[in-house]
Image: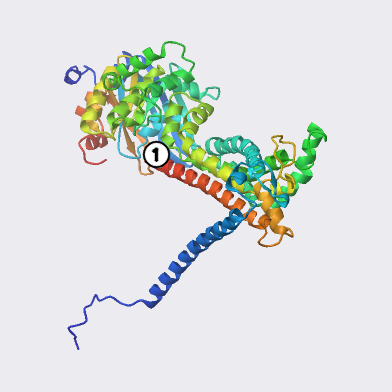
Amino acid sequence: MTDILQKIPETDNVDQAMTDEKKIISVDDVTIHYGAFKAVQNVSLDIAQNKVTAFIGPSGCGKSTVLRSINRMNDLIPSASITGKILFDGHDMYESSVDPVLVRREIGMVFQKPNPFPKSIYENIAWGARIHGFKGDMDELVETSLRQAALWDEVKDKLKQSGLSLSGGQQQRLCIARTIAVEPKIILMDEPASALDPIATGRIEELILELKENYTIIIVTHNMGQASRVSDYTAFFMVDENRSGYLQEFNITEHLFLNPKHRKTEEYISGKFG
Amino acid sequence: MKSIQTHPFNKKLRIREAFIEGALFLFALLSIAITVSIVVILLRESLLFFESDEVTLSGFLFGTKWQPMIGYFGVLPLLNATLMTSLIAMIVALPLGLAVGIYLSEYADEKFKSVVKPVLEVLAGIPSIVYGYFALTFMTPLLRSIFGDDVVQMYNMMSAGIVMGILILPLVATMAEDAIAAVPVELRLASYALGATTLETSIKVVVPAALSGLSATFLLGLSRAIGETMIVALAAGAGPKMTFNFFEGAETITGYIVRISGGDVSYNSVDYTSIFALGLMLFFMTFTLNMISREISARYQTEYE
């Protein structure tokens, strides 16, 4: 983990840094309402491919709302509405012709509380692939997914046992393996370690660093240490006086933490509020 | 004057409290006493039935002919008709109730629910005798016009069973919806996040997770169908008959009890005590089903703690 901190990019300008990255997601002037309540306003930022982007900020700043809008999970909340664009590989995912089910196959999600299905460990992994008509070798898919999620060695002898029989940290890695098994391009993680103990949290963080080889990861976290350890880019969200969230600062993680441009960012990362 | 005996926190006698507590306790006791005495009366009268010279326990349990007037006391024809009508009722109510439950829980918006749920409650509030006439004057003629008058008898188990299914549909639908809605929302989110459709999520994740609640629903619906009386008394026929043809008439246990208790049979005759034996049998059947159903519900409530 330390070697990442050592190679601090030369530039402290995120736009300049981004020109060298492939932008897989572009959030363009997004405003999200829940009914009449404006949850988050005018958010624009780019997500770099095969990098980890962290969303941080105080409670109610809309970071989870923005995260869920990226794979259209907000559609499941009947009162939610969105303006602006979210481009994925150049396609606006909020065009009326877009099927959110197909979006979610490309952009998977891991939740705050581990939520394995009440099925066997094997079935938890196989389920998603099966509904997408996977025709290949299921045993192999289960094994590679569990290996990628660093869970294989712990569960290889008990694949038939219920996913619920695992510890919290193992359950969360099972959920990550389940997400990997449908081969998304992007994995959204909504405070994936907040319900776990420090050791399990450490394993999840190591896993995130391994996964970015193959996936683009966006992680919401309350833990600023975690954001600084795992992410390449960090977006700091704030709440205004109307309780609406907005994007205060977005930068290369090292610069945001070591040299924040805004006073609010500095106060938040130094623990003055939040 | 300050007395040494009076402690400021001494217990105070609250007569009203004590009175109300006592009264509530008596009411609770009363409801238990009533239940126990019903069971006692059932047992006592049943005992009279089995003590009678014409009746043997094996003849009662395994006999295929029920003709009390001429000394045949085999319960199987009545039991068979009860189970057949209940089976038809469940075949109607379970898929429909499950579909309604899934739709209400997984698809319907609040506005639609606010219309459908009161309608279901109205349906559940219709007296069963009304359903009985519905079976007799609508369902039976409909069946006869479809399958022919020579196939479908005027009184038949099919008509009674179908209408009984409609009667218990609100119960099954509401309970199914409760069981399905009790599945944690996190499981649905997990499924949607994997790119599943609402149908895949409902059928492959939510319903299997609600299975114990749904089996409790099934058992309670079955128990309700077995005990249901007016529809079968009106539409299923008034003669005990050992038949497996759904389009024939056959009297059910409840149908027989209604006919005898409303008729001119003299007290203390074997016919008269026979209805207590049948009542006891029904009681055991529904009691067992309800207990299993309760046990299953209790288990699924703790499943997701």
Could you classify mark 1 by the number of other residues whose Cα lies within 10 Å: few (under 14), some (14-19), or many (20 or more)?
few
Q: What is the quadrant of residue A156 in the picture?
A: top left
Q: Secondary structure at mark 1?
A: helix
Taking depth in this image into account, of B248 and B200 the one nearest to the observer is: B248
- What is the residue that sits farthest to the bottom in this orientation? B1
Q: On what subunit does the disc labeled 1 rest? A: B
Is B238 on the left or on the right of B96, as rendered?
right
Q: Position of residue A212 (x, y in %)?
A: 30, 17
Q: Nearer the viewer, residue B31 or A105?
A: B31
Q: Which residue is mark 1?
A: B303
Q: How is the image coloured?
A: rainbow
Considering every residue shown, the one lying at the far front of the view is: B53
Examine the rendering and report whether any part of residue B36 can be seen.
Answer: yes
Relative to A257, say whether A133 is above or below: above
- Note whether A106 is above or below B52 in the view shown: above
The number of callouts visible is 1
- Quarter of the figure with the C terminus of chain A: top left
The extreme top residue here reads A136
Residue drawn at x 51%, y 26% as measured from the top left:
B200
Comparing B85 with B264, the one in front is B264
The percent position of residue A226, horizontal first and vertical second, equals: 24, 29
- Left or right, A206 with respect to A132, comes to left
The residue positioned 40% from the left and 16% from the top of the image is A183
Of residues B21 and B113, the one drawn nearer to the viewer in this rendering: B21
The answer to whether residue B115 is seen in the rendering is no
Residue A22 vertical position relative to residue A273 in the rendered view, above or below: above
Displayed quadrant of residue B109: top right
Indicate the position of residue B25 as horizontal and vertical percent values: 43, 67
What amino acid is found at the position of numbered circle 1 in the picture? Glu
Q: Residue A124: x and y, percent? A: 39, 24
Q: Residue at x 25, y 76 (%)?
A: B10
